[in-house]
Amino acid sequence: MNFRRGSRSAEPEINLIPLIDVLLVILIFLAATTSFNRYQQLQLTLPRASAEAMQPDALRLSVGR
């Protein structure tokens, strides 16, 4: 008995409707969770580098017995 007689003529097909539904749900989720507010920038005064190099403090070591 051959039970696979009718399956050769039927080609497998990909159903795109569920894929489109899932992509639309993801798109709606991303659009709902994204914030479109512009945040104000912080006004910072950054330090400027000077041309003079700082000399490190002298390190004194004394060695005893």
Image (cartoon, grey):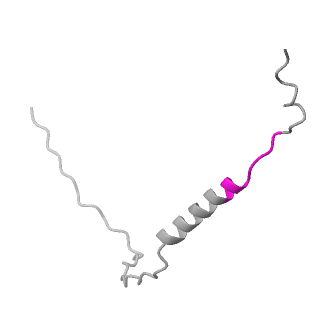
Q: How many marks?
A: 0
Give the magenta part as a residue range: 12-20
Residue furthest to the top: 1
Q: Quadrant of the C terminus?
A: top left
* Residue 15 within the magenta-colored segment of the rendering: yes
Question: Which residue shows up at 80% across the image and 44% down it?
Answer: 13
- Residue 55 horizontal/vertical position (percent): 31, 65
Compared with 63, 2 (above or below) is above
Q: Tell me if 2 is positioned left or right of 45 in this view.
A: right
Question: Which residue shows up at 59% across the image and 65% down it?
Answer: 27
* Residue 32 within the magenta-colored segment of the rendering: no
Question: Which residue shows up at 86% across the image and 37% down it?
Answer: 10
Which quadrant of the view contains residue 24? bottom right
Which quadrant of the view contains residue 1? top right
Q: Tell me if 46 is positioned left or right of 65 in this view.
A: right
- Residue 32 horizontal/vertical position (percent): 49, 71
